[in-house]
Amino acid sequence: MRRAVCPGSFDPIHNGHLEVIARAAGLFDEVIVAISTNYAKKYMFSLEERLEMARETLASLKGIVVEPVGAGLLAEYCRHRGVSAIVKGLRSSSDFDYELPMATMNRQLSGVETVFLPAEASYVHLSSTLIKEVASLGGSVSDYVPRSVHRRLVSGEPSSDQQPRR
C-alpha cells in the first residue's frame, strides 16, 4: 500500500488544502491528513474542532484518514505509520524555500520523501491566516472554505479553550 501524509495545523482547513488532499488521494492508496499542534502558536480552533472539521469535509473522499500527529517529529510519525511520502502544496517560491530544508531533513531522518504539488491557480492566495483575518473583520470567505468551516467561522462561538471570536 502506498501511504502518504498531508500534515498541517489546518486552522482552519480551506479549499486550497482540500484541492491538494484530493490530488494526493489520486496518487496514493491512502492519505493521512495529520493535524498538528504547535504549542507556541495560538489557534482559533481547538485540535478537536480541527479534526472534526477535516473529518466532516473529507468524509466523501475514499482513502482519506484524519488523525492528530501527536507529539514528536513528523519523520518519526511517518516511520511509525508506514508513510512513504509527505505531500505538501506549494503556492509560491517562498513556500518552496521554506519547505525544502524540512523535506531534506525528513528524508535524512527517516527516508520519507516529500512530494510537492503546485497549488491550483485559483487558490494560490489562500492561507488559513488570511481567511481568519478576513472573516474576523466581517469579510465573506464562503467561497474559500467548506460549509462546516464557514459555519464555525461566522458563529462567533469560541471553542472551550479559546478567546471569543468576532
Image: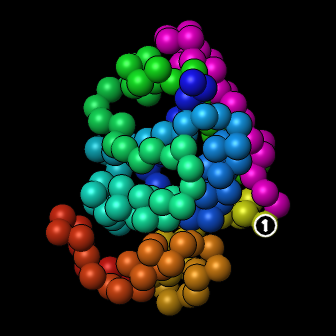
Q: Residue at x 32, y 85 (%)?
A: 156
Image quarter where the C terminus lies is bottom left
Q: Is residue 6 magenta?
A: no
Q: Is residue 41 above or below residue 29?
A: below
Q: Amino acid at mark 1?
A: Ser
Q: Which residues are magenta?
A: 93-121
Q: Does residue 5 appear in the picture of this structure?
A: yes
Magenta span: chief secondary structure: helix
Residue corresponding to mark 1: 122
Q: Residue at x 32, y 26 (%)?
A: 72
Q: Quadrant of residue 74?
A: top left
Secondary structure type for disc 1:
helix
**Vertical position of residue 21 compared to residue 55: above or below:** above
Q: Quadrant of residue 162 in the image?
A: bottom left
**Residue 12 location in percent, x, y?**
46, 63
Residue at the limit of the structure toward the right, as seen here: 121
Q: Residues within 10 Å of mark 1 (few under 14, many from 20)?
A: few
Report x, y in % for residue 122: 78, 66
Position in image of residue 126 (x %, y %):
65, 64
Residue 3 drawn above or below residue 150: above
> Which of the two residues, 29 or 139, is positioned nearer the viewer here?
29
Q: Position of residue 21 (x, y in %)?
A: 61, 49
Residue closest to the eye, 82 or 121: 82
| Left or right, residue 20 beside residue 37 | right
Please state, as top left, top right, bottom left or bottom right, where the N terminus lies in the image.
top right
Q: How many marks?
A: 1
Give the residue at x 64% y 79%.
143
Residue at the extreme left of the image, as rendered? 160
Inspect this view and state whether residue 127 appears.
no
